[in-house]
Amino acid sequence: MYKNLPNNKNLRVNAQALRKEATKRERRLWYDFLKSYPIQFNRQKNIGNYIVDFYCKQVKLVVELDGEYHRDEDVFISDKKRAEYLEQLEMTVIRFKNEEIDKDFSKVCNKIDAMVNALKKRM
């Protein structure tokens, strides 16, 4: 287990820019749910050579939102490699499509909450 996460300091500026230029769905999930969640989440967290959308250190949970861009086969393969890397760091990765945020936001929030609670029980 890693005491400190691997971190590519060269990605810091990119992560800051992504926080400032968050997508509509990222903003909604952050401001309407994760920002005030009882356990701290970070947004656009630099882990290794990747920047994840949302990360909860306490339970090692990564939450990713997938838009149109993620439907491309090359991006799908890249996402799979990224998930494998994060899982090697003993993290759990859950993904939601933008449509899920738009159509059933409360269901997305409930899934994240359920995952956090399940992971807390394992720790």
Image: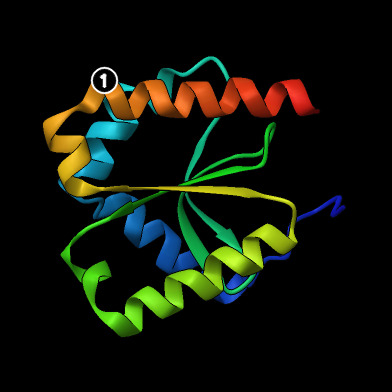
The percent coordinates of residue 105 (x first, y second) are 22, 27
Say which of 63 and 13 sits in front.
63
As drawn, the residue found furthest toward the bottom would be 74
Quadrant holding the C terminus: top right
Mark 1 packing: few (<14 Cα in 10 Å), some, or many (20+)? few
Say which of 51 and 115 sits in front.
115
Q: Say which element carries label 1.
A: helix
- In the displayed structure, would residue 59 be above or below residue 47? above
The percent coordinates of residue 27 (x first, y second) are 24, 38
Q: Which residue is at 45% across, 67% downward?
A: 13
- In the displayed structure, would residue 22 be above or below residue 118? below
- In the displayed structure, would residue 121 be above or below residue 66? above
Disc 1 marks a residue whose amino acid type is: Ser
Left or right: 55, with 65 as reference point: right
- In the displayed structure, would residue 67 be above or below residue 122? below
As drawn, the residue found furthest toward the top would be 38
Which residue is under mark 1? 106
Q: Which residue is at 34% across, 78% downward?
A: 75
Q: Which residue is at 67% across, 29% downward?
A: 119
Left or right: 48, with 25 as reference point: right
